[in-house]
Image: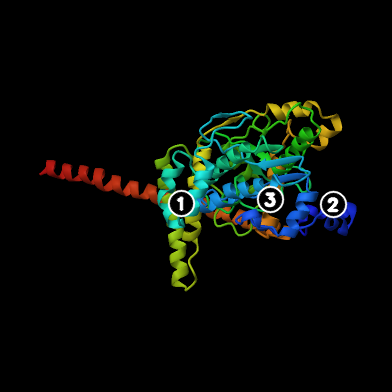
Amino acid sequence: MLSNVLFDKVKEQRGEQFIYNQVQAVYGDVLMPNLGISEKDLELLQNEVSIIYHCAATIRFDEPLRKAVFINTRGTKYMLDIAVTFKHLDLFAYISTSYCHLHVKTLYEKPYDPPADPHSVIKACEWLKDEDVELIEKKILGDIPNTYAYTKSLAEALVVEKFNELPAIILRPSIVIPIWKEPLPGWTDNINGPTGLLIGAGKGVLRTMYCKSNGNGDFLPVDIAVNGLLVSSWYNLNKFNEQLVRVIHMTSSNDIKVSWQEIIELGRWVIENKVPFNGVAWYPGGSMKSNYYVHFVCMLLFHWLPALFVDALLWIFRYPPVLCHVQKRITKGFEVFEYYANNVWNFDNSVAVNIRKVMNKTERFNYIIEKIDLDLIDYFTHSILCSRRIILKETDDTIPAAKRHMKVMYAVDKFVKFLWLFGLGYLIYKYFLIHFVGHTTIAKSIDNL
């Protein structure tokens, strides 16, 4: 982990060995009682640790319910169980999500009732097998669209239960997106959220999305999320408030108002004009559809039919088919995305505003938690560059070739569209000629007879 490029800056500043001397790895597993930590290591933690950040979770929205409960909910219970044995614990911070109480359209910085008793859900999942839980998963989830939101809300309830025993707080970040400033602008290591959309659209694979184009999500650069975590800890540890501030939102909707349409348009402009991807399947295009049936037809025409055609060719030439498998993953991802893209939530972040008031000028500059002044073109450029380098393993020296390929694909795209329109016009012309001109000629012949 420490070989990650994120740590290059601190290594340059403090030396290669500095960072290795600051941390000690302890084996653990959230699926095991006591987190699978050995007695010796547990004793070390109980005597030495004063702050716990519990971030461990599966962030797959389509994770089977039983597995998600064991990792996100029971894993949190195990963490709380050992936290109460720590001798010098000053703070327990649980990293939740602002999208875990989806029935509440305006979420305030307070605890909410869980959708079920977390202890009962854990016991039920321990009794039943995977296939048994899968059969009743939809009934258990009810109106909650995915297992991630469900299990995170259950985990929050477990933390709330310990408020009287532990100095515990709940931090709710929104949709975490690539780094804005520190230490590496644009860094990300996964394709969750808008990054996946940009890569899919930039490669020419995504041609249609069912989405309210003027809708927006609450996006938070990961470095701002980390700032929020650090500042929230500092605020509570220094007791600026008489009591612990138990629930804190790390959101940006008051500062960053960018619609899904703007994300696609800005990302497409950057990809087309500044930083294209290598080997794009087609020139980036397509659009968002507010009508599901129009989107469904376009998905059949522009996603599934090309995938079937290419896979058929691959099969003929004895290569393994791949595009239909990719399309299945895209379709499953759409199922998750569509729920969030077609709904809007508001998040109160009064605590962040109040915390900022007690920070001095230097602290507000170094640890931004509010007043996020994001240059979107610059941000998207860095994000796409890092996606090329880190996720797609495309080196910068291939960018000129990628730009040339993009120009070729632009010409191919226009030519194919011209042929399609020409063919359509020809068919209409032939139909008109046969059905109208032909009928008129026959009618005149009959009249002459």
Q: Does residue 137 appear anywhere in the picture?
A: yes
Q: Residue at x 49, y 51 (%)?
A: 125
Question: How much space separates mark 3 and mark 1, taking CA atoms?
Answer: 29 Å
Q: Are marks 3 and 1 in contact (CB under 8 Å)?
A: no
Task: Give how far across and how far down residue 426 sits, in percent.
Answer: 37, 50
Point out the tag, 3 or 2, that comes first from the N-terminus: 2
Q: Residue at x 55, y 57 (%)?
A: 281
> Where does label 3 land, which residue?
188
Which one is nearer the viewer's eye here, 341 or 448? Answer: 341
Q: Quadrant of residue 194?
A: top right
What SS does tag 3 mark?
Answer: loop
Q: Residue at x 75, y 57 (%)?
A: 41
Kind of residue sitting beneath label 3: Thr
Q: Residue at x 79, y 50 (%)?
A: 47
Count of numbered circles on the image: 3
> Where does label 1 land, which residue?
302
Question: How much space separates mark 1 and mark 2, taking CA atoms?
Answer: 46 Å
Point out the tag, 3 or 1, that comes first from the N-terminus: 3
Q: From the image, which quarter does the C terminus lie in?
A: top left
> Where does label 2 land, which residue?
10
Task: Give how far across and how far down residue 397 sits, in percent.
Answer: 73, 60
Q: Does residue 333 appear anywhere in the picture?
A: no
Say whether residue 59 is left or right of residue 65: right
Kind of residue sitting beneath label 2: Val
Point out the tag, 1 or 2, that comes first from the N-terminus: 2
Say whether residue 44 is left or right of residue 188: right
